[in-house]
Image: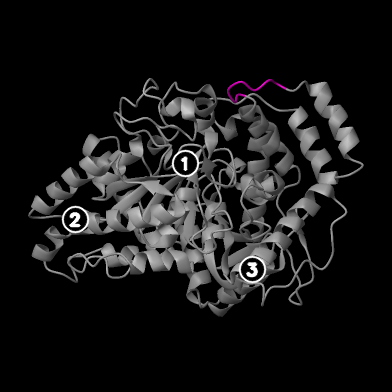
Amino acid sequence: MSPALQSSFDKLEDDDKLVDVPSRSLRSYLISSDVHDDDEKTRCASANLKKAQMLAEVANTTLKCANTGDLAERAARQASELDAQTTPKKPLHGVPVSIKESFAVTGQRSPLGLRELNEPTAPVALEDAAIFTLLRAAGAVPFARTSVPPLLNSTETNNPITGRCLNPHCHALTPGGSSGGEACLVASGASPFGVGTDFGGSVRVPAHFCGVSAIMVDTERRWRKWRRGCGGVHGALEMIDRAEPYTSLGFFAHTAVDLRLGVKALMEAATALDDDDGSGTSGMQWTPADIKRVGVVLPFDYDGSPREFDGVEVAPPCREAMQAAVASLEKAGIEVTSYKPPPGLVAATIQVSAGVGELAPGKRRTPRWAKKVAAWAAAWFTRRGAELLRASSECQEPQDGGWVAHEHIAALREQMAQSWREQGIDALLAPAFPIPAYAHGRSEDAFLGLGVTGVWNALGAVAGVARSGVRVSARSCRWFPRESRDLLVARLVKLYHETLGLLRETGCELPVGVQVVGGSEEAVLAVMELVEANQRVK
């Protein structure tokens, strides 16, 4: 946490000793019946809500990450109802939860960072997003809506309505996007559990930049029904409506243990709701995973020599985080081996996501021939840029069925599943992003890094980010050993150098994370816990 943010919390008046120290852990909010008596449990919801609202307001003053006004009245009403219950049995009873502003809220607008959607004449939601039903069923109290970039389309969070969201560890850097406000609020300690969305890294990149744990869940099968309304007011923007089948739900917490407690509680609540309505079709029953073998997507040498992910070099601290994660798993008795994803996956991902992107309001479609000419010209300066342009020139129209509706991606999914079965792999380790958090206003230079996250959306995988004990500072961090000849890769390398310069000026330190990929929430969270358990994570 930055000195300025810590000072803001220190100045917060002690109101009945509710907010003496920011409490980051979800576990500190869980007043379970096997530890406390029922009377204490039934009194906690309103107190928890008051504490979270006060902390969130202080965090927002400094970081521009959230607002509590939209949900204040309904949150107070729900907390009072929970406190009045005599036999509470809900797993997240009275836990305050923050949620990304893109989720629809009855009677409220979802501006998505656009002024025109924040006008009094802009449409309001007629019903809540489905996730609110699940949160309430688990006993959680949604209390704050968190900031997003315009159209949810950036790896940083800055919009003309709420302003620029700041990284809680170093205010000169971005917290990431598009769920940047959510990661920021959780990292500040103001929210113990957060809900976001992930189209190509929108949950995982902010978690990596802000030093929290996060997971993109299996929204195509298990969580599909709970995705409804994740893009705001239905009908407000065609692009967002068409992107919803490609969007995954995601969750944030301070640690992997907290994340597992929250996700498991929601899965149990979903199972109970299905039992109540007689459908019994969710498949959300929690089944503990038995992890024996983990693959490493980025091969690296233990001497720290540079290696690449999809042609993009990974910065030294991010490689060190991978090395530390491997050491943690090996210490826990897990076998670790190298793994290479199916070729052509990144190109296929771009072909589909470019088709969704061209639905942006007022955006003119670039002729296919122009993209091919641009790709030919770009090849002289950037091999990766030329590949991206060639892929986008073959962009595919988005389908209502999501990623799997595209035959090429469906075939690649089967290839990956087959290779996992042949190698006996239970999960994968991969970089969370090629570099740590970068300076504000530089998202266009950072987009190439999304190749390490977006591929897993296309593959329909579950993917999370675990915290690492590695910290980035100007004193301890090495520079890239060489400049890249690729123009786009060089821009990413330059961002990293700029980050080191800003850390030198401010004296701040940054966290980094490592990505864990698997076929189920249980497997991914199990590996994340092992990665974090054997490291000294601040």
Q: Residue at x 55, y 31 (%)?
A: 402
For label 3, the SS is: helix
Residue 364 covered by magenta stretch: yes
Q: Earlier in the sequence, mark 1 or mark 2?
A: 2
Nearer mark to the viewer, of 1 and 3: 3
Sequence-earlier tag: 1 or 3:
1
- Residue 505 is tagged as 3
Residue 506 shown in magenta? no
Percent across and percent down for residue 325 are 59, 71
Horizontal side of 253 relative to 322 (left or right) equals: left
Which residue is under mark 1? 219
Would you say the magenta stretch is mainly helix, strand or loop? loop
Looking at the rendered structure, the number of numbered marks drawn on it comes to 3
The magenta segment: 359-365
> Secondary structure under badge 2?
helix
Disc 3 versus disc 2: nearer the observer: 3
Residue at 50%, 64% in the rendered image? 528
Q: CA distance from mark 3 to mark 2?
A: 43 Å
- Residue 148 percent across, percent down from the top left: 49, 42
* Residue holding disc 2: 45
Disc 2 marks a residue whose amino acid type is Ala
Based on the displayed image, in which of its 4 quarters is residue 314 positioned?
A: bottom right
Q: Amino acid at mark 1?
A: Thr
Question: Mark 1 touching mark 3, by CB under 8 A?
Answer: no
Spatial CA span between label 1 and label 3: 42 Å
**Neighbours of disc 2 within 10 Å: few (<14), some (14-19), many (20+):** many
Mark-to-mark CA distance, 1 and 2: 29 Å
Residue drawn where x is 49% and y is 26% of the image: 241
User: Along the horizontal axis of the image, is 100 left or right of 431?
Assistant: left
Q: Earlier in the sequence, mark 3 or mark 2?
A: 2
Q: Crowding at label 1, few (<14), some or many (≥20) Cα neighbours within 10 Å?
A: many
